Amino acid sequence: MDAEFSLLHLAVLGHGLKLPNGMVIDEVEIQADRLAIVDQKPKFETPATTIVRISPESLQTFIASQLPAMVRDPQVRFHDGKILVSASVKVLVEISATATLSLVIQDQKKLLVELIDVDKPGPVRGILENQLDAVNPVFDAKDLPLDLKLERVAIGKNIEIFATATA
């Protein structure tokens, strides 16, 4: 079927996209060449490049909303390509701990947070591992209206997920 209309280039920048899991994506940038609309659906002649950006503040808000009452006051920052989360954990006594986390792409579709290290020994590590199981995946491509293939993730000022999209 012939295209209803076509574009040589499309650039879209979206802000504040809330996913079904509650995570807020600060920015989604999509760039596509040779896009056609066929039967009211977009068709990319070549895959679109997509960048998804998540700020430390958005990740902190998401993590805080997922924590049990025993974990309080999470603070998130990005440093040297890692995510550092500091929080207070009350087991028998209150313990302040900092976890070092990384991001891993699974099956080109999901972004998972993995625990690298915790600066305190004892039960804090197990509590954090259980929490990560409940939170993961923090991003799932199925939640967006495009067929995204996650290619790589970088942590700098923001988390940036680089992907290609087809429609």
Image: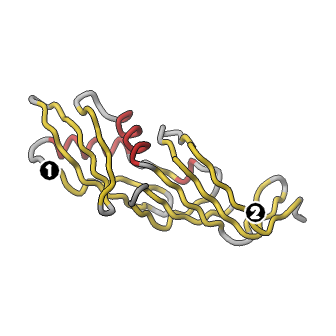
- Disc 2 marks a residue whose amino acid type is Lys
The residue labelled by disc 2 is: 43
| Distance between mark 2 and mark 1 Cα atoms | 49 Å
Of 143 and 159, nearer the camera is: 159
Residue at the image point whose x is 50% and y is 42% from the top = 24
Circle 2 packing at 10 Å, graded few (<14), some (14-19), many (20+), is: some
Horizontal side, residue 42 vs residue 64: left or right? right
Q: Position of residue 20 (x, y in %)?
A: 53, 39
Circle 1 packing at 10 Å, graded few (<14), some (14-19), many (20+), is: few
Q: Position of residue 129 (x, y in %)?
A: 25, 46
Dot 2 falls on a residue whose secondary structure is strand
**Which comes before the other along the chain, label 2 or label 1?**
2
Q: Nearer the viewer, mark 2 or mark 1?
A: 1
The image quadrant that residue 41 belongs to is bottom right
Q: Which mark is residue 119?
A: 1
Image quarter (top left, top right, bottom left or bottom right) of the N terminus: bottom right
Q: Total label count?
A: 2
Q: Position of residue 48 (x, y in %)?
A: 65, 66
